[in-house]
Amino acid sequence: MLKNFWYACEFSAAVTTKPKQVRILNQKLVFYRNAKGQLIALQDRCPHRGAALSLGWVKDDCIHCPYHAWKFQADGKCINIPANQPGIPIPKNARVDSYPIQEKYGLSGYFMETYQKNSVRQSHLCQNLKTQVYRKFSLNTN
Ligand code: FES
């Protein structure tokens, strides 16, 4: 996998408020939309016991793990552990990776990067995504 590139990996219409697992280049991601229709892309592996978040549910713009219902917000941070007693802090490592994600040409693309997290390179999106779209569909049709 090439790091620091945009990857077109799903049709935009296929991503709804219901979590959807997207596999690309041996990576498992979960895509969903918040109440405003914005796309969210997270690592599809709960940091607690490894359950697939894509089997969970979305409520209040957060995704809930299907196993013990940990609640993750769009930036990947866990903000609720139902089994915790009141006042018990949430561990700092209770989070999943989040990825910048954009829609262009009816496709959803996410940005896999190695560093400079949260620095979305908007200017490169169209060109890189267009290139990836052509590659994906030319590969699929051959
Ligand atoms: S495996 Fe996700 S909350 Fe336990």
Image (spheres, grey):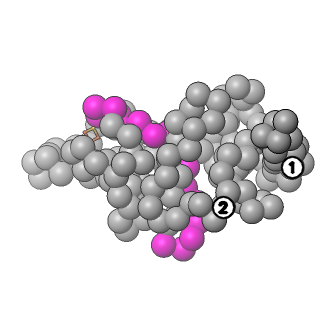
Label 2 CB, ligand 1: below 8 Å?
Answer: no
Coordinates of residue 35 in the picture (x, y in percent): 48, 72
Q: Is residue 69 left or right of residue 129?
A: left
Q: Is residue 12 left or right of residue 142?
A: left
**Identity of the amino acid at label 1?**
Lys
Q: Give yes or no for contact between labels 2 and 1 (Cβ–Cβ under 8 Å).
A: no
Determine crowd level at label 2: few under 14, some 14-19, many 20+ residues with C-alpha closer than 10 A: some
User: Which image quarter has ligand 1?
Assistant: top left
Coordinates of residue 19 in the picture (x, y in percent): 45, 55
Which image quadrant for residue 111?
top right
Query: Which region is colored magenta?
Result: 35-50
Q: Which residue is mark 1?
A: 130
Q: Which residue is mark 2?
A: 12
Q: Is residue 128 visible?
A: no
User: Which quadrant holds the C terminus?
Assistant: top right
Whether the magenta-drawn stretch holds residue 32 is answered as no
**Point 73% across, 47% down: residue:** 8
Task: Name the chief secondary structure element in magenta.
Answer: loop
Q: Which of the pair 125/1 is nearer the observer?
A: 1
Coordinates of residue 137 in the picture (x, y in percent): 81, 45
Circle 2 sits in a helix, a strand or a loop, which is it? helix
Which image quadrant for residue 73?
bottom left
**Identity of the amino acid at label 2?**
Ser
